[in-house]
Amino acid sequence: MSRRTPPLVPRLRPHAESVFAEMSRLALEVGAVNLGQGFPDTDGPLQLKEVAIAAINDGRGNQYPPGTGILELRQAIAVHQDRFYGISLDPQTDVVVTTGASEAIAATLIALVDAGDEVVMFEPWFDIYAAAISIANGKRVGVPMSGPELRPDIDALRAAISPKTRMIILNSPHNPTGVIFTREELQAVATIAIENDILVLSDEAYEHLWFDEHEHIPISTLPSMFERTITVGSGGKSFSFTGWKVGWASGPRDLIAAVRAARQHLSFVSGGPFQYAMAYGLGLPDQYYRELRTDLALKRDLLCGGLEELGFGVIRPEGTYFATTDVRPLGYTDGMTFCRELPHKAGVVAIPHAVFCDDPEAGRPYVRWAFCKRTEVLREALDRLRAGLS
């Protein structure tokens, strides 16, 4: 009797279960502190909750909102892009609201990548990039971040470009490394894209989460880049309401029209009342964004300082709410092994970089930790690590 063929198509089998599901399940099984999954453990501004509740009570957004997003949010996104970056957008044609940044990324790849097209991205990468490229029948091409600080390797990027390259995915602030691309690095990527007539998908979900002097710069603000760049944003990351799943894509009208065409056949619409809340949030004063960064920077320093004391090689992040460590100083050679043992040894969960790489060596010794948690949770995790790793 023949064995039944697995029903999942081959190109999606590598994506059948994410490492986040595995590690979160393990955290529950052993009662571990979960510093693996990147979501805050406190809610964002009360005013946004009140706006969402009022919208529900007033009957705004309880039925299908417009397929491109409510006009108030599209207008707020346009104002936000002009306010922070000097980018001029027409909210009627240059913006589409999506079910989180994840859907904006997936819709962009489905709309603009055809079978056999190559999509180049830096490793480690956010796992949804790989899955969405597979769904689009494209081919991903990884370019490892390099050096002790895991910076983008521009020479390797240039070498990875071929006549089949359709798109470069850029993620700055970068998950999982916390690197923010400098203007010089962005210009080098832009030059490669322009010279080879390549589109750029710029995932800027963590745009407001930057620290010290490492201010975020959208690549679409560089000369000749707006017309070839789809920029992705996330209300969940900027306002700490990740469960509301409100994101967006913006850019030139021809590219956004393509994204809209694909997006309407995915979730169609979502999050009507929450869209009103996000529109309000985008108009919050600069003080809100400064305080958000200040709070996260203190948590970054707490976690990174504790990990350094424990002997990890710490790459202190310039942005996002993730810190990367090298586990080799602790006697480990493999981050995956370390992360699978850690919940049992110390009652803490982290995520290995290896799951974000095609090159097994690129991420082997590195581990990602989320610090978007309450201070007492971070202290508890460090106490457990001290006891479990001693």
Image: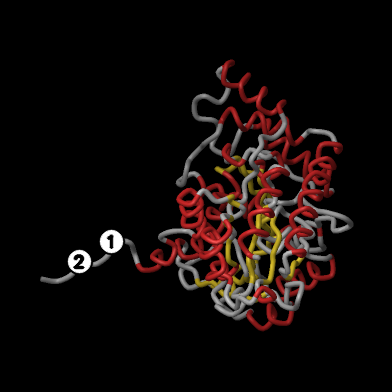
**Rendering quarter of residue 55:** top right
Of residue 291 and residue 257, the one placed in the foreground of this image is 291
Q: In x, y percent, where is residue 16?
A: 40, 60
- The residue singled out by tag 1 in the image is 7
How packed mark 1 is, by other alpha carbons closer than 10 Å (few <14, some 14-19, many 20 or more), is: few
Kindly identify the residue that appears in the image at 74 percent across and 45 percent down: 89
Query: With 82 as the anchor, is 13 left or right in this view?
Result: left
**What residue does disc 2 label?**
4
Rendered view: 61 above or below 325: above
Whether residue 94 can be seen here: no
Residue 3, quarter of the rendered image:
bottom left
Q: Residue at x 74, y 67 (%)?
A: 314
Residue 61 in picture, x, y percent from top left? 56, 26
* Viewer-side residue, 228 vs 29: 29
Residue pictured at 64% horizontal, 77% vertical: 331
Q: Is residue 177 left or right of residue 64?
A: right
Residue 40 pos. (x, y %): 65, 43
- Considering the numbered disc 1 on the image, is that residue within a helix, a strand or a loop? loop
Q: Amino acid at mark 2?
A: Arg
Residue type (three-letter) at the residue carrying disc 1: Pro
Q: Residue furthest right?
A: 213
Per the image, label 2 sits on a secondary structure element best described as: loop
325 left or right of 12? right
Q: Residue 167 occupies which quadrant of the picture? A: bottom right
Residue 319, percent across and down? Answer: 76, 56
Residue 215 visible from this viewpoint: yes
The Cα atoms of the two marked residues, 1 and 2, are separated by 8 Å
